[in-house]
Image: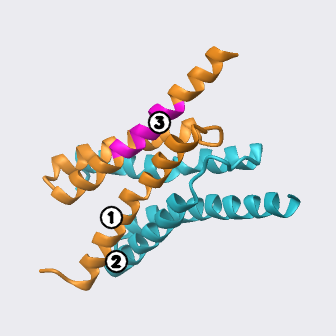
Chain colours: A cyan, B orange
Amino acid sequence: MFTTIEGIGLIAGALTTFSFLPQVIKIWRTKDVSSISLLMYSLFCFGVFLWLIYGIALKSLSLMLANGITLSFALCILCLKIGMEKRIKEKN
Amino acid sequence: MFTTIEGIGLIAGALTTFSFLPQVIKIWRTKDVSSISLLMYSLFCFGVFLWLIYGIALKSLSLMLANGITLSFALCILCLKIGMEKRIKEKN
């Protein structure tokens, strides 16, 4: 049954999942990753990957969807961070 | 009962929660917030706050703990972003 509490959970999931999209767009536009923490996104991506495994094990569609989408955004940020810093190092 | 799957869930929760700490430390050390997305942390903090409400409603200690700690780290980053950009604007 759909309750107010489940509604809050769904909004919470959508917000924490899609909040990473503005960060991807900001990096893409500015090509600036200087203040992004490599360690944060490395730990975060691994954590979200484990959440995805957890969701698959529990056969929870919500966990699979939310963590699948979050992982793709977070991996984008991680790859942009690594790629852009590599380019800067090669230039210097 | 404690299962391998629940163990994976606990590690996942610890990783995604504490991953924000290196970002807080990085900003604190470098005083650089240029590439941090204000919109990302605004949406993320609101989403984690709703997850906390959801955890309180479900009386889930894991949800309350994980989201309480994540919210304090994410709020730190959000306040540092707003505070440092305000100072830069005042200087110019």
Task: Residue type at mark 2: give it.
Answer: Lys
Left or right: where B12 falls relative to B77: left
Q: Mark 3 lies on which chain?
A: B
Q: Circles 3 and 2: CB distance less than 8 Å?
A: no
**Left or right of B92, for residue A23:** left
Instruction: Choose top left, top right, bottom left or bottom right for residue B71.
Output: top left
Disc 1: which residue: B13
- Residue A90, position as x, y percentages in the image: 84, 64
Marks 1 and 2 belong to one chain: no
Residue A33 appears in the rendering: yes
Q: Which residue is drawn at 52% across and 50% down?
A: A18
Report the span colored magenta.
B71-81
- Please, what is the three-letter code of the amino acid marked with disc 3? Leu
Which of the pair A26/B73 is nearer the observer? Answer: B73
In the image, residue A61 lies at what x, y percent? 39, 69
Q: Is mark 2 on a helix, strand or loop?
A: loop
In the picture of the structure, the residue carrying the numbered disc 2 is A59
CA distance separating discs 3 and 2: 34 Å
Residues under labels 3 and 1: Cα distance?
A: 21 Å
A20 is higher (above) or lower (below) than B32: below
Is residue A69 at all visible to an observer of this figure?
no
Residue A20 belongs to magenta span: no
Mark whose residue sits in front, 3 or 2: 3
Q: Which chain carries label 1?
A: B
Q: Residue at x 65, y 38 (%)?
A: B34
The structure residue drawn at horizontal position 63% and vertical position 23%, both measured from the top left corner, is B88
Dot 2: few (<14), some (14–19), or many (≥20) neighbours within 10 Å? few
Q: Name the residue under label 3.
A: B78
Give how far across and how far down residue B68 sits, in percent: 27, 47
